[in-house]
Amino acid sequence: MDPPSTTTYTLPPADQQDPLEPEFEQPSSRGCVDQQLCERPSIWRQLWGIRNVLVVLLTPIILLPLPLAADDPKTQCAYVILVMAVFWITEAVPIAATSLIPIFLFPMMGLLTARTVSATYLNDTSVLFLGGLIVAVAIETWDLHKRIAIGVLMLVGAEPKWLMAGLMAVTWFLSMWISNTATTAMMIPIVQAVLQQLKTSGHGDQEQSPTGEGPCMANGGVQLEMTPIGDDVKKPVEDQTKVDVSNDNKVQPLGATPDEHTRSAQAKATQIEEAKHLRMCKAMSLSICYAANVGGIASLTGTGPNLVLKGQSDIIFADNNATSPITFSTWLVYGVPLSLIVLVLLWIWMQIYFLRCRGFCDCFNGGTNGDASKRVKTVIREEFRKLGPVSFAQWCIMIFFGILVVLWITRDFGEVAGWGEIFRPNFVSDSTPAIFVSFLLFVCPANVPNVFCLRKPGDLTKPKIRPILRWQDVHEKMPWSLYLILGAGYSLARASQDSGLSEWLGGKLGVFSHLDPYLMLLILCYIVAFATEVTSNTAIATLMMPIMAQLAVNLNVNPLFFMFPTALATSFAFMLPVATPPNAIVFSYGQVRVIDMVTCGFLMNIISVPVIILATATWGNAFFNFDTLPPGFIRATTPLSLFNTSSPLPLLLNATG
């Protein structure tokens, strides 16, 4: 249609207008005279655009009176920690770049020498993490994790609740060994393919009715086959002989156009099915990122905060002439049962919240229809077929991975000496087998060497042997920035201890000593769990570990009593997309809204923390002796007993034990 003659604008047709361009509007007689003035952003919008610059410039200036007012190492260390905390939380500077601040600021303030600070950025814990991630890179490079995932899905079937259980179990297991981000990025496309087949079967395709009278809808109802009627369309004779007596006993041809009641019923049924499928998409997607976060706490190398706890506990125990009891095998004793309990609770809650299940009933009112089940199984089998047979490299990686896990578990059993104490006491650690196996991955060939095979006459080409892992693979997939974050945490812990800041903060927190220790631990875990929703879990663990250690010493208990639970609580980031990379990956697919993640994740935050307290008070205390201060630690001036008469949980455990 031509535009009105009163305007000079030429409006393109609706189907030709670029959807990214704003719609043309008629100029208003009351419009602004200066168009540039109308389009100028507000002052608040301009300030928001330069917020990062303002944070970087104003934060050090605002906090500057702290070290100037009191020329004390504690205030100087607190100044550096506060500046880094603001940068970490706001991400005005990249997190890895913020982690470099101690390298130049601590020597300039006279807190630590440059040699001491630099040495903290690469220690035994960092080397352990390096070896574990190199093995994880090999698994990712050769798609071994995808083979494991699809193989498990072929076993669990296509019923929604068991399909979700299989997806969560695979994600949980893989995130124990490789990064949570890589696990989520690998699993989400598989989930999307499965959900697409469920949607196609539930809405697009039709099954034949058992009675043979017509096609059957996905929800079990019978759908009438509609035939168009018009002047130029002849209706088949057989359709005219069939009648429908459902409308007030009036005889109507089945081929006739349905009335408004039938249309409304069909539209309502379609909306119900669409809503069910959307809830299932949200449930499956969120279960992946949540299971990845939960699986990270099961093993020592699962996620960054675990390594922060390991490294800082080594420092704290070594400074008090003691040995940290945290090893790969001892971590499994505490982390695996805790992680499994949270995973089962998560699976139950996702069914109740999204799939509208009551207990363990079949989802979608009787489960998935047969056609959907067949399609899902077909997709899974097709994906597994694309992987081909198990290659020589994959067999080698599985063997090396099994050897590494066995060496980790058997090196030190805690009370019982492992191969590390028998072979080289006090010389080897968990990093030793990690680097050894990682080195073998660069040496072992990826294919069966054909050097000894018969070669064709005249073939003068040199045989090429590709190793399982090349340095280029490691360079591209290794999260190098994480080592800077870990190093910054170790340097902050060292400076806090040498300057006396940790002891001072621990003394100030002593005002809460009248509270039950488990109640105090519950409050601290909730604070950390909700704080990690808006900041890096590794950063918050780095800031909290020295404070928790000194608080425990002041309360005359094992430093791990506060350090272990609060470090694990940083991984319970279920509420916001910015909390962890797995959450952001799931959110980017557009099926999950922020409100869905907040409402579902809030309850997970609430119920996960008590599970940590339960683990600490039961098998954690039985194995690590959380109620006993290790020899070498200086006891507080006023002895405080963890298991006293005012603490109901330990009394209950002692009475039942």
Image (cartoon, grey):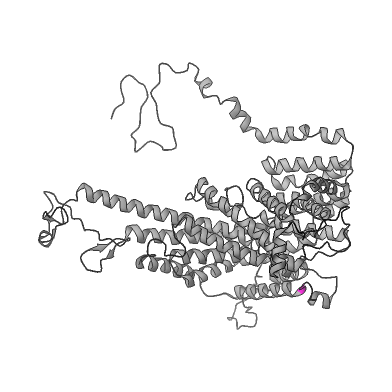
Q: Position of residue 417 (x, y in %)?
A: 80, 76
Q: Is residue 179 above or below residue 333?
A: above
| Magenta-drawn stretch, dominant element (helix, strand or loop) | loop
Q: Is residue 327 visible?
A: no
The segment highlighted magenta reads: 411-415
Q: Which quadrant of the figure contains the N terminus?
A: top left
Q: How many marks?
A: 0
Residue 647, position in %: x, y?
A: 73, 58
State the residue at coordinates (79%, 68%). 429
Is residue 552 magenta-colored? no
Would you say 206 lies left or right of 432 here? left
Residue 561 on image: x %, y %: 75, 59
Q: Residue 657: which quarter of the image? A: bottom right
| Corner quadrant of residue 245 | bottom left
Which residue is at the front of the view, 61 or 450?
A: 61
Residue 385 can be seen in this image: yes
User: Within the image, what quadrant is residue 157 found in?
Assistant: bottom left
Residue 414 magenta-drawn? yes
| Residue occupying the point 65% across, 80% down | 451
As drawn, is 304 to the left or to the right of 271? right
Q: Residue 507 location in percent, x, y?
A: 83, 47
Q: Is residue 98 left or right of residue 167?
A: right
Q: Front-most of 509 and 377? A: 509
